[in-house]
Image (cartoon, grey):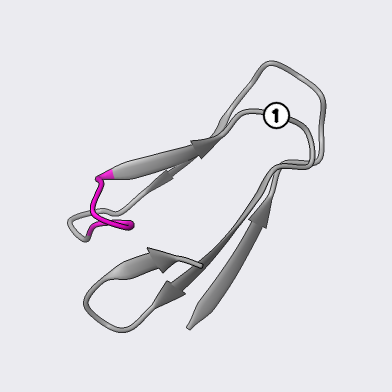
Amino acid sequence: MVLNVKKIDSTASAIAGYGYGKSIDGTASTSLTTQYQYLIIQYNGTTRYII
């Protein structure tokens, strides 16, 4: 499964992504803080990878 996440607004609010027991590229969470920043996350059933 592939998930695309993009922050489209210019507010100071961050978008947070949590692994909920599974890591995201070896960490428990990740966040998007600037406008138009994006992540593409691939999940293989065990681990989530930022690609």
- The vertical placement of 29 against 25, above or below, is above
Q: Position of residue 17 (x, y in %)?
A: 44, 46
Location of mark 1 (residue):
34
Q: Main secondary structure of the magenta part?
A: loop
Instruction: Residue type at mark 1: give it.
Output: Thr
- The vertical placement of 51 against 35, above or below, is below
Q: Is residue 18 left or right of residue 21?
A: right
- The vertical placement of 32 against 22, above or below, is above
Q: Residue at x 49, y 37 (%)?
A: 31
Q: Position of residue 5 (x, y in %)?
A: 63, 56
Asked if residue 26 is among those painted magenta in the image, a careful observer would answer: yes
Q: Position of residue 6 (x, y in %)?
A: 70, 50
Q: Residue at x 51, y 67 (%)?
A: 51
- The vertical placement of 1 against 5, above or below, is below
Q: Is residue 50 left or right of residue 15?
A: left
Label 1: element kind: loop
Q: Residue at x 79, y 42 (%)?
A: 36
The picture quadrant where one finds residue 35 is: top right
Q: Residue at x 76, y 19 (%)?
A: 11
Asked if residue 12 is among those painted magenta in the image, a careful observer would answer: no
The span shown in magenta is 23-28
Q: Position of residue 22 (x, y in %)?
A: 21, 61
* Nearer to the camera, 32 or 21: 32
